[in-house]
Amino acid sequence: MNIKKVGNVILAVKDLDKSIKFYNEIIGLPIKEQRKSWVDLGITGSLLSLHPASSTAPHTGSSVENGISIGFLVGDLKSALDELKAKGVTIHRDMIEKDAGKNAVILDPDQYMISLFEPIFKDKDQQTSGYYGFTPA
């Protein structure tokens, strides 16, 4: 087997339209491709793919119980949280500082946890520029 990289992360959601609105309009991920029951979000690298959860099986538990969590890097965690709070997004765990950077956790419409991480680089020239808050400037 010769795996090169992660192609996409597939997330089963209760309400596809509500999740598209959350990840596209609130989080800011662009829609790369959309079909009736499948949406790919992102531009390059790994994509986040949404599809409807089974209508015959109940969706139960949080992302911790399901073993699912999504992580995004941000340029400025404080402004990202301010922006998301203004949009009514649930903050599961507010910002904490660690040796490697700042971290917070928000919830999506299905209560999946999304980790937001602002890394601290030893060389400040490595820090991602061109971002204000969660979405590109």
Image (tube, grey):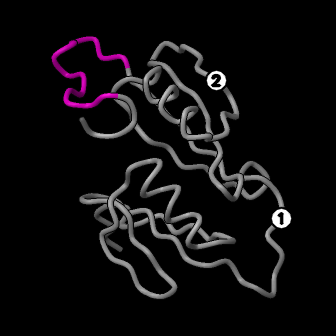
Q: Residue at x 38, y 64 (%)?
A: 41
Q: Quadrant of the N terminus?
A: bottom left
**What are the residue bounds of the magenta stretch?**
120-132
Relative image position of residue 122 (x, y in whole percent): 28, 11
Q: Residue at x 52, y 69 (%)?
A: 10
**Relative horizontal placement of residue 129, taking residue 134 as reference (left or right):** left
Residue 73, located in which quarter of the rendered image?
top left
Q: Residue at x 49, y 12 (%)?
A: 99
Q: Which residue is mark 2?
A: 94
Residue 131 lies in the magenta-colored region: yes
Secondary structure state at the residue bearing disc 2: strand
> Image height check: is 65 above or below 78?
below
Relative image position of residue 50 (x, y in whole percent): 51, 71
The mark that comes first in sequence, 1 or 2, is 1
Q: Of discs 1 and 2, which sits in the foreground?
A: 2
For the residues labelled 1 and 2, the Cα–Cα distance comes to 24 Å
Q: Residues within 10 Å of mark 2 (few under 14, many from 20)?
A: few
Q: Residues within 10 Å of mark 1 (few under 14, many from 20)?
A: few
Q: Which residue is mark 1?
A: 60
Residue 125 or 13: which is nearer the viewer? 13
Q: Residue at x 69, y 59 (%)?
A: 110
Question: Which amino acid, by three-letter code, is at mark 2?
Answer: Asp
